[in-house]
């Protein structure tokens, strides 16, 4: 994004920091030697190469993501699929779909459209939408992130202490968790709301022809006290929005993998211990005592096995979602932290150049939901289990 184009805010944290570089009353233009630091010239060439195709790629991801999340919501809200875990997954799907839906007009306006009329491009309406898009997507994306953390923590509790899982991870508590996420996250974003406003500038594009350029700019509150609010937003969102959830999910992912491995080992030990018993029963087949397995017992055993397999699939699905989240979110969190440490040169030469790419990763994280295939399969299993229970009565 050039410094003389309309300033826009984007969904990811990278583009929020991009506004600091473009909107501030302080000029961030660097000397040539600064541009060479942190491979600035090479990353500039990469950014210039990727930017023309970003709009079309992001639009394709958005269309796919909306369809995927709508299907997810339809499946998860079926009567026989209602559960505490699925309620949290539904809350995640809604917030992800809101992020994607808001990005579609943003991508069309800023990357795809060929409109050259500066009066239209810089109209107040588009500036207002940009401001709304920035706040709305940050809120929804943050809600999705923290619901992912809650879901991972609940899954760990359910596996670690299955006897208490129904009490700890009840539907009532799931609704409270979702409600808290949708209320507390907007409240925590209040400093961000106060930091930006819409400013109007006079531009003389042709001789004796002047029009107004509207753009998202820092508010008067944000630039007071040595830009204290700007700096607060930078550290709050780089740490609260990115690093803390990534660290928590890394720990929970490792814990889930460990618990899953331990469960598989226990299962193998049980299977190996049952083999001698089966051989003994086979050798004593001529004895007077015979074992007769009723259809009801067989059905109950089948239901238990199906339940265990479903639990394992749920854990594996969640691990896949967590890995996808870490791949998409960790890079921007690390780069944001390094920008705070190394300053504006690193931000402009590195973080800023990866802005569009990190937006794409955030969209992919919202669009590619690994729960689709598993939930479709689980719906079939749920129908079969219901049929089996009916036959067993």
Image (cartoon, rainbow, N blue to C red):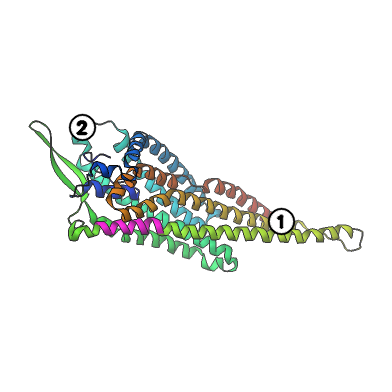
| Residue 87 among magenta residues | no
The location of residue 390, given as percent across then percent down, is 67, 55
Residue at position x 65%, y 54% from top? Answer: 306
**Element on which disc 1 rests:** helix
**24 versus 104 height, above or below:** below
| Residue 238 among magenta residues | yes
Disc 2 target residue: 117
Front-most of 122 and 393? 122
The location of residue 64, given as percent across then percent down, is 45, 40
Choose top left, top right, bottom left or bottom right for residue 361.
Answer: top left
Q: Earlier in the sequence, mark 2 or mark 1?
A: 2
**Element on which disc 2 rests:** loop
Residue at position x 29%, y 50% from top? Answer: 17
Label 1 crowding class (10 Å Cα cut-off): few <14, some 14-19, many 20+?
some
Instruction: State the quadrant of the N terminus.
Output: top left
Q: Is residue 90 left or right of residue 383?
A: left
The location of residue 326, given as percent across then percent down, is 46, 52
The location of residue 292, given as percent across then percent down, is 82, 59
Question: Which numbered circle lies on residue 228?
Answer: none
Choose top left, top right, bottom left or bottom right for residue 42.
Answer: top left
Q: Is residue 375 left or right of residue 265?
A: left
**171 versus 387 height, above or below:** below
Disc 1 target residue: 299
Instruction: Specify the principal SS of the magenta part.
Output: helix
For the residues labelled 2 and 1, say whether their Cβ atoms are less than 8 Å apart. Answer: no
- Is residue 302 visible from the viewing direction of this image? yes
Residue range of the region highlighted in magenta in the rendering: 230-243
Front label number (2 vs 1): 2
């Amino acid at each position: 994004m050039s410094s003389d184009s309309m300033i826009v805010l984007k969904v990811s944290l990278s583009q929020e920091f991009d506004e600091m570089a473009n909107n501030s009353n302080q000029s961030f233009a660097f000397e040539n030697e600064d541009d060479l630091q942190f491979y600035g010239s090479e990353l500039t060439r990469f950014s210039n190469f990727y930017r023309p195709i970003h709009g079309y790629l992001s639009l394709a991801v958005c269309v796919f993501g909306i369809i995927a999340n709508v299907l997810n919501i339809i499946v998860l809200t079926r009567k026989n699929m209602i559960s505490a875990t699925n309620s949290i997954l539904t809350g995640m799907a809604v917030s992800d779909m809101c992020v994607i839906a808001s990005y579609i007009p943003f991508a069309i306006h800023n990357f795809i459209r060929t409109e050259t009329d500066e009066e239209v491009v810089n109209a107040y309406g588009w500036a207002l939408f940009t401001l709304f898009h920035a706040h709305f997507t940050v809120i929804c994306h943050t809600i999705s992130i923290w619901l992912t953390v809650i879901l991972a923590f609940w899954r760990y509790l359910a596996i670690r202490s299955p006897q208490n899982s129904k009490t700890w991870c009840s539907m009532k508590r799931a609704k409270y968790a979702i409600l808290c996420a949708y209320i507390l996250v907007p409240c925590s974003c209040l400093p961000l709301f106060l930091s930006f406003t819409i400013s109007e500038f006079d531009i003389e594009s042709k001789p004796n022809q002047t029009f107004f350029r509207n753009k998202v700019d820092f508010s008067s509150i944000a630039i007071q006290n040595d830009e204290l609010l700007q700096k607060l937003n930078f550290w709050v969102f780089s740490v609260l929005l990115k690093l803390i959830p990534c660290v928590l999910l890394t720990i929970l992912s490792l814990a889930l993998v460990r618990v899953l491995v331990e469960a598989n080992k226990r299962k193998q030990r049980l299977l190996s211990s049952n083999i001698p018993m089966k051989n003994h029963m086979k050798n004593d087949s001529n004895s007077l005592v015979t074992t007769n397995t009723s259809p009801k017992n067989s059905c109950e055993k089948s239901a238990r096995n199906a339940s265990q397999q479903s639990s394992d699939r749920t854990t594996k699905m969640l691990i896949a979602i967590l890995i996808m989240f870490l791949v998409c979110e960790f890079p921007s969190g690390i780069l944001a932290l390094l920008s705070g440490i190394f300053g504006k040169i690193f931000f402009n030469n590195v973080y800023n150049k990866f802005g569009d790419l990190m937006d794409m990763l955030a969209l992919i994280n919202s669009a590619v939901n690994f729960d689709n295939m598993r939930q479709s399969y689980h719906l079939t299993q749920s129908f079969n289990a219901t049929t089996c229970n009916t036959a067993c009565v």
